[in-house]
């Protein structure tokens, strides 16, 4: 099974809608004993409004296309889209078994498969609205177990960790990074001498550059200091399956199994529509912290209701159904179709980084650990490099190539000695090459990038 087909001449697949219709008929048979209740809606009115919606939705960047190579956006696989839509006719709520028996079971199975991917036979976990809420739950548990102690994450960690710490009333300190954008463990050691750190957040795939914090080495420090480790693998978690990581990166990603909690976003690399994050705890006993009684909802069964181990109450069962279906089509195994699709994006990133490094007009960022590339045009000064990046970003979009921008500290870039350091950060060009098709589109991306740069710099 291929992860995605070539970009068809019509860009948006509609043939799979017949598959949906067939499945809907099967679903309907499950309720055939009921007295009729369906009333026809006025389809002409729907069709008018939906046409307006279609018109309005044209006002978007082409996120589904390989020439959209900017932010972390990957289209949901048709199986996820179809399963999600199919579930909407039931609209299950995975808060309680009363609200969605089948979809709750599917959520438990899908999450157990993610736990297995990390290397856990037992776990406590569930889906969330996204990585932010998933990290919130992990830090809430961390703060409950290490009350009064500091939370730390690297300077390149997602901003959500310092913000969530604020929400939870926990002290937060950020740790400087090395020149590859990874947490600097010497700097962490200094902090550990000064403060009682309760939890260290290791980012497995930073949002700006895809850097992987040295989790394996962090575990040695943990033995000395006894802090908790939370792995924010919202972006990079699925690379646990990849066979194409550099040995050093692989060494740390493999240690996800030793973290106390892990966050992975199926709506980032896992082919899901938005609204699908996942938090997992290695020790199922943390479930006691979630303990509460719901006076409204937990009646139909003594089995675990997902709302009993989740901070969110109502949650879309459809998201669980979509994830379950996707993982049937693409099991989370090394060397499967899914893991090979991750490798393709990585190959694209390495190729683009190589092209940039060999070309005197550009200054590359760190060698990609995953599938994200950052770079800046050469310029007499840091501030001028930022100005040029922004202009090239605009011009490339005019030419159909959608990139992103990222403000990076100077040490992350191999700047020539001659460049004036008149700012602490450079606004860099950034490309997240997370679609498997990107492997075949790098040369086209490179071509448009250079045409755009020539126009701007002339
Ligand atoms: C995307 C991301 C988040 C935030 O997750 P959302 O799903 O956007 O809420 C947190 N951490 C990392 C490393 C991320 O890449």
Image (tube, rainbow, N blue to C red):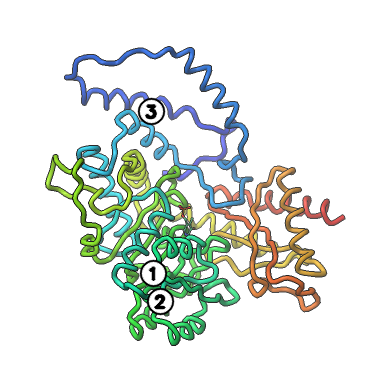
Q: Nearer the viewer, residue 70 or 138?
A: 138
Cβ of mark 2 under 8 Å from ligand 1: the answer is no
Q: Residues within 10 Å of mark 2 (few under 14, many from 20)?
A: some
Q: Is residue 324 left or right of residue 101?
A: right
The vertical placement of 38 against 8, above or below, is above
Where 128 sits versus 236, above or below? above
Badge 3 density bin: few <14, some 14–19, many ≥20, Cα 10 Å: few
Q: Camera-side residue: 190 or 110?
A: 190
Give x and y (percent) for residue 356. 70, 63
Identify residue for label 2. 216
> Residue 278, position in %: x, y?
36, 54
The Cα–Cα distance between marks 3 and 2, rounded to whole angstroms, is 45 Å
Label placed on residue 254: 1
Cα separation, mark 1 vs mark 3, equals 38 Å
| Label 3 vs 2, first from the N-terminus | 3
Give the number of the disc on residue 19: 3
User: At 34% across and 57% down in the image, what residue appears?
Assistant: 279
Residues under numbered marks 2 and 1 in contact, where contact means CB atoms less than 8 Å apart: yes
Q: Secondary structure at mark 3?
A: helix
Name the residue rendered at 32%, 13% in the picture.
39
Q: Is residue 301 left or right of residue 413?
A: left
Residue 102 found in image quarter: top left
Disc 1 vs disc 3: Cβ atoms closer than 8 Å? Answer: no
Tag nearer the camera, 2 or 1: 2
- Asked whether, in this view, residue 314 is left or right of residue 215, the answer is left
Residue occupying the far left of the picture: 302
Secondary element type, mark 1: helix
Give the quadrant of the C terminus.
bottom right
């Amino acid at each position: 099974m291929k992860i995605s087909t070539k970009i068809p001449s019509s860009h948006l697949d509609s043939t799979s809608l017949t598959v949906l219709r067939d499945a809907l008929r099967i679903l309907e048979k499950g309720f055939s004993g009921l007295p009729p209740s369906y009333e026809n809606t006025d389809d002409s009115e729907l069709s008018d409004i939906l046409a307006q919606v279609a018109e309005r939705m044209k006002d978007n960047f082409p996120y589904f296309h390989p020439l959209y190579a900017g932010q972390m956006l990957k289209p949901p696989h048709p199986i996820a889209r179809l399963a999600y839509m199919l579930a909407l006719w039931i609209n299950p709520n995975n808060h309680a078994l009363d609200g969605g028996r089948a979809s709750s079971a599917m959520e438990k199975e899908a999450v157990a498969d993610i736990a297995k991917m990390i290397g856990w036979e037992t776990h406590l976990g569930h889906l969330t609205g996204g990585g932010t809420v998933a990290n919130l739950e992990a830090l809430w548990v961390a703060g409950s177990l290490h009350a009064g102690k500091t939370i730390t994450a690297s300077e390149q960690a997602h901003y959500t960790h310092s913000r969530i710490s604020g929400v939870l009333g926990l002290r937060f300190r950020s740790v400087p990074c090395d020149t590859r954008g990874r947490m600097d463990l010497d700097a962490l050691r200094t902090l550990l001498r000064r403060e009682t750190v309760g939890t260290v957040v290791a980012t497995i795939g930073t949002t700006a550059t895809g850097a992987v914090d040295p989790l394996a080495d962090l575990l040695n420090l943990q033995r000395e200091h006894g802090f908790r480790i939370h792995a924010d693998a919202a972006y990079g978690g699925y690379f646990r399956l990849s066979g194409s990581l550099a040995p050093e990166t692989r060494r740390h990603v493999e240690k996800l199994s030793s973290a106390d909690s892990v966050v992975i976003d199926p709506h980032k690399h896992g082919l899901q529509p938005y609204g699908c994050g996942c938090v997992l705890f290695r020790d199922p006993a943390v479930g006691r912290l979630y303990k509460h009684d719901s006076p409204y909802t937990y009646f139909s069964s003594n089995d675990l209701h997902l709302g009993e181990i989740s901070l969110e109450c109502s949650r879309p069962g459809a998201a669980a159904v979509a994830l379950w279906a996707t993982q049937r089509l693409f099991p989370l195994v090394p060397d499967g179709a899914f893991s090979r699709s991750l490798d393709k994006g990585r190959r694209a990133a390495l190729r683009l980084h190589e092209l940039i490094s060999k070309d005197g007009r550009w200054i590359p960022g760190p060698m990609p650990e995953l599938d994200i590339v950052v770079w800046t045009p050469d310029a007499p000064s840091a501030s001028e490099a930022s100005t040029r990046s922004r202009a090239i970003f605009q011009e490339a979009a005019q030419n159909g190539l959608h990139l992103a921008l990222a403000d990076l500290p100077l040490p992350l870039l191999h700047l020539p000695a001659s460049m004036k350091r008149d700012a602490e950060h450079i606004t860099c060009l950034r490309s997240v090459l997370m679609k498997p098709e990107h492997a075949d589109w790098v040369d086209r991306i490179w071509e448009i990038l250079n045409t755009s740069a020539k126009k701007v710099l002339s």
